[in-house]
Structures are given as structure tokens and as C-alpha cells.
Amino acid sequence: MKKIIITGFALMITFSAALFSQDHVNKNIFRQLTEELPSPNSYRTASGHPGPDYFQQQVDYKMEITLDENDKVISGVEMITYYNNSPQTLTYLWLQLDQNIREPNSLGSKIAQSTMRNQEHISSIMRYNNHFEGGFRIESIRDAQDQALQTVKNHTILKVLLSEGLAPGKKTELIIKWHYNLNNLRTQGGRSGYDPFENQDESTFAIAQFYPRLCVYNDYGWQIKQFIGAEFALEFGNFDVTINAPSDHIVAASGELQNGKKVLSPQMLQRLEKAKESDTPVFIVSEKEAIENEKSRAENSKKWHFKAENVRDFAFASSRKFIWDAMSVPFENNNVLAMSFYSKESNPLWSKFSTKTIAQTLRAYSKYTFDYPYPVAQSIDASLGMEYPMIAFNGGRPKADGSYDVGTRNWHIGVVRHEVGHNYFPMIVNSDERQSAWMDEGFNVFMQGLAEREWDINQYWSGIPAEMIGYMDDDKSTIVPIMTHGDGLLQGGMNSYRKPAVGLTILRETILGRELFDQAFKEYARTWMFKHPQAADFFRIMEDASGVDLDWFWRGWFFTTEHVDLAIENVKVFEAIYDEKSALRAAEYTKKKLRPHIASLRDKGQFISEIDRDTSLRDKYNNPEPLVTEQELIRLKALGKKFSDEEISQLRKGQKFYELSFKAHGGMIMPIILEFEFEDGSIEEVRIPAEIWMKNHTAVSKVFIFENEVKSITLDPHLETADMDTKNNYWPRRTERIFFDVRK
């Protein structure tokens, strides 16, 4: 007993040393995320749900906007009503001035690194140094009493000092007059602006970030990160917007059109009503009508009036080139109008795919989250890929003759699905894109993959673990953890889009399973509809709703740059000896394994052995010994007495014990998924939870008992763990076959 205790104590010391560094820091992969996550409180609970003191501000906007098509200028007057639902008295408000990223000598241009490496870099440098007079021109900011308010500008944010403190439960009003010059999307890039058509005096106007708007204020304080590339953090509110556009333009916007009878013809209104009942697209403006509309240019304007309730932002598009189609997408309590607006240059691609892609996206996303709650969902042809509530600017145009290749088709369908899908994340589940870009992009790519498989089960889908190969095991100086704020990301496409999406796929398919994951993910989505979730809220609610401790996964996948490289290090086969026959089989195997030395093989035929030449030298010991001696059989029978009759009965069935040793070379652990192929052609799959690595993060072993002879073993047979090196996933090892191209 004493010896056993000492041995156990020694093992405990060894284990402790492996999981603690020399400075006594706990390095156990399975330790709780107490250091990484903020402490739960009355605003945000340990279950990931909003607490009793959770609050969020409301901001309503009433705006009159004018689009100057000739001078490419947007101007407007807005009245902001700000409701202080926080427990603090506010003496100032922070506004976002996102257009200031384009003002001369902007912060973005100052901090942007640049090289003369290639044409793309040179073009980027020229865009930053073309002296475009962009940025907001704030003409006035006044309060409800028409008193001018003091302001302090800080690049892309503006501090407005209130004339008196805004107490909890109270509201205040700001009246702002402003204008700015629109950027050319083709030459200056950006998330909004005007998109000119080649060899035409026509443009599509895709307008967003066009008004001063409130920064988020919540239990974390003001979100005042500068706009230098990452996206947005916004408050929910109601919008009442009038847009003055050329009278021959068609205007699409966030929300519902309020004055259709004034801006649409009776025929268009009739078609729109028909579309509300149709499960296939109905043309509100046909291609023929759009072509006719392009032939003249109106001098006067028309007012389009839209309202959008409980949205975090507002955007619109305007063009005389628009073809317009629409169809109905019914849900239990909401009949959604899916609509597309596009030019003749985009046909037949858009008329075939855009609106139907919207409809399928809404159905697929709603199945895994919540029914789409808004009245419309729109796709706008603007050579972009950008999302706003109820409206998205998308790309993909065929060749001049109307033909398109599979890449163009897939790009168009993909960008429509992705940008429309953003209505769920972050337009409704309203995360902070500047702080946690992955909470909208990663979630959306994951959801996009679910929708893609429902569109075409045989196509390549987004969020597949194989997308990580070549990234996670790359030079660690070129990547950062997912939990890096948006502007600090390296390889942002992989880090904020692909890696978190793959992580969710692994959670759903490999760690939790679909039933647990889907229920927990839906709990997160529905809990945080029209609210402001943080990363900790997502981590906690997924654990609370699934009943599974996932801290090891969050830490490895989201907080580090470790990669997955599990390996089958060794395989040993143990076979019981229970009678003379099995003993002979074991001896035969051992004899075959102990092959003669090369010298003995070479000696044969070179000379005659002395005992063969002089047979008098032989005695009984020169005769071949039996493979199993009588003494060995006696020993084996004595050993057999240590097993119970039931165990011996099982062993007599010829069961074999396969001891497998595994290594985690990459630092990121995963469940162990094994596929055993047997000599009779049958296959068995075994799944072992990641907790097998709990007491040793680098090496573990497991014994499997089979009656059939194992022919081969494959680790991660479905490539579901994002394993970076699959060459060590096989037993016996496979020859790596590499193809090289010698064609001209």
C-alpha cells in the first residue's frame, strides 16, 4: 500500500509539473475562462442571458435627404431623438461621422501602411492621396430649443456637449444639417457611393453611412473606436426618412415605402400587390421599361418616403436603370417581400437568381434562428458586397452578351446570400462589429454554409474545416487570435470569417452534435434578438443551453493561434493465449518476426555444418524444439487462473486488444474520431470526447477490443477537426502520392 501511494504521489507531481509553468501559472487547457472573460454581473449573467439591470439606448431618426445626381452630393437635415435608458446621467453624446474616413489627411490615410509592391498597392496609395474632398460638412447642430451645441471633433467621431445633463429615463433632441461629396466606387472604393457604368453617363447610387449617427452606449460605456476599416456598432431605433431623388429614378431603402401611390404608377402598384401573393418573382419594372426609362433624364425630383421600425441603421439605393422584381416569402406571423433592383447589364443573371436566393436565404436562416421579423429584404445591384437592415448592395454581372461562367454565377448567389444573411447577424442580433468582427462575419459564414447545403447539397459550402489547412499552421507571426478587435486583425478574411465559421461547424458536427448545438444556438439568437450581445454572452449561453463545458474549446480556438494536428503515434495488438492452439499461433508469429541475421542467410550453401558432417556430435538437443514447451503450457494455464470463467469465455472468442497511442502536435486538442476497417470489409466508427486529453494535453492512449482482425485505422476520417497534417492519421502509414504537372 505504501509503495502504491508513493507511486501515485510521484505521478501527481509529474502531472502537476506538466500543467503548470515554472512561474506557477495554470496551463491546464481545461481550466475555466475566469481570466479571459469579464465577470458576470447584473447586466449580463453567468448563463449568458441579459441580467435584471440590462439596458440599451434607443435612437430615433427623422430625416429629409437630397441626392444631387449631377454634382454627386448628398445633403440632409435630421432630427435625432435620443432616449437615455441607462442608469447614468449623460452630459454629452458621441456621434459617428463615418464619411470622415474620406476627408483629406484622414486618420485612416495617416496610419495606413503602404508599399510600391504591385499595381493593387499603388492604386490604394493613389486613392488615399487623390485629395478627394470627402467627409461630412456639418453645417449646424442645435437642440430642441434651437440653441447651438458645442462640439469637439475627433476624426470619425464627434462629441456633442448637451446644454444640460440627460437624466435616466429622459430623452433629448438634436437637429443636424450636413452634406458631403459622394465617392466613386470604381476609382475610390468604399462601402457606399456611386457606381458608374462604363461608357455611360449613368450611375447607380448605393448610399450608406450617409448621416451622423449615435455611437453605442451600454454597460461597457461609449463605443468610440475610430472608423478606419472595421465595420459598425449601432443603436436600435425607428427611422422616418424622405429621399428627394430625380423623378425618373427608382428608390429602394431600408423599411417600407409609405407613399407608393405618389411615386409609383398604378400599373406598378398593381404588380406590387400581385408580388405580395406570389411565390415566384413578379416584375414591378421590367427590363423593357427600365431601358425606356434610361432614354431621357428628368430635371425635377420626387420624394420617396420610407419608415423602418426597430432597426440599427438605414441605407438606400437610387437609379433610373433599375429593373425591379419581387416575390412573397411567408412565415408564421410575417409575410416578407423579397425584392431585387438591378440594371439590364446584370441580366439574365439577376432575374434568374437574386430574388429566389433572398427567399431561400430567409427560409434557411430562420430555421436555425428565428423567423425573419422585417417586412422586406432587398438585393441591390451595386458591384459591392455590403449589408444593411432590409437592404444589401451586391455584385455579380454577366458578360456583355449576357453569358456567364460558373464562377460569376456562384459569386452572385454567394454574395446575395451572405449580405442578405447579415440581416440576422448583426442587424438583429446586434453585436459590436468593431470589437468582435467574428460575431457577425463568422456567424454569417457558418449560417451561409447551412443555407448553401440546402440550396445544393453537392456544392462546396462555407465553413468546412478543410478551409483551415494552410492557415492555422502558418507562420504564427502572420496570424492573431479570433478575439482581436476588428482593426487589429491579420488575415481578416480567415480570422473573422472562416475560422469562427469552421469553429461553429466543429461544435455542431463533432463536439456537441446537431441536436445540442442547434437548440443552444437558437437560444442565443432568440435571447439576443434586438439586443447587444458580447462574446462572453455567446460563450456562456452555448454552455448553459447545451450542458457542456466548452472552455477548452473557446480558449484554444478563439483566444490562441494553436492549431490541430492529432496523430496516431503507435498501434500495438494484444492477443490472448488460452490453449495450445493459440500458444502455437503466438509462437509462429514470434518466430516469423525474429528473422535470421543476414550472416546466417549468406552462410547457407557456403559450407557443411560440422554436426552434419559428423553426426556423432548430435544429441537430443540438436532436434528442433517445439514452438511451445510443456513448461510454457503449464505457465500459461497458471496465468489463465487469474481470469474469471466469464472473461476466459470472452477471450476464447479470439478477441484482440488494440492499444492506440495518440499525440497532439499542434497545441489545439479535439475529439478523437476513429474509423476501423476490418479484414472482412466491415467498418466501425468510434468517437471519443476531447476530455480524454484532460490529464495529458500531448499524449494519450486507448485500448479497443475487437473479434475481427483490424486491417487499417483512420483518424478523423471525415476531415471534421481541421487537422493540419493528415499524413500521420493512418495506420498502417499510407504512401503520400503527389501529382505534378508537366503540361505546357
Image: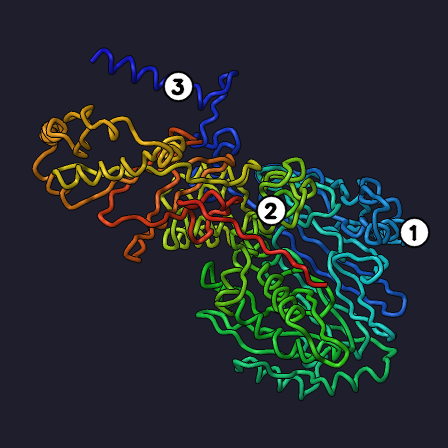
Residue 714, compared with residue 308, is above or below; it is above
Residue at numbered disc 2: 470
- Mark number displayed over residue 131: 1
**Amino acid beneath label 1:** His
**Amino acid beneath label 3:** Thr
**Amino acid beneath label 2:** Gly
Dot 3, crowdedness within 10 Å: few (<14), some or many (≥20)?
Answer: few
**Quadrant position of residue 633:** top left
Quadrant in which the N terminus is drawn: top left
- For the point 59% across and 81% down, the residue is 281
Residue 531, compared with residue 536, is above or below; it is below
**Quadrant position of residue 266:** bottom right
- For the point 66% across and 76% down, the residue is 350
CA–CA distance in space, label 3 to label 1: 65 Å
CA–CA distance in space, label 1 to label 2: 40 Å
Judged by depth in the image, the label closer to the viewer, 3 or 1, is 3
Q: Position of residue 333 (x, y in %)?
A: 46, 69
Which numbered disc, 1 or 2, marks the residue that appears first in the sequence?
A: 1
Q: Position of residue 328 (x, y in %)?
A: 54, 77
Residue 432 seen in this snapshot: no
- Secondary structure under badge 2? loop
Numbered marks: total: 3
Which numbered disc, 3 or 2, marks the residue that appears first in the sequence?
A: 3
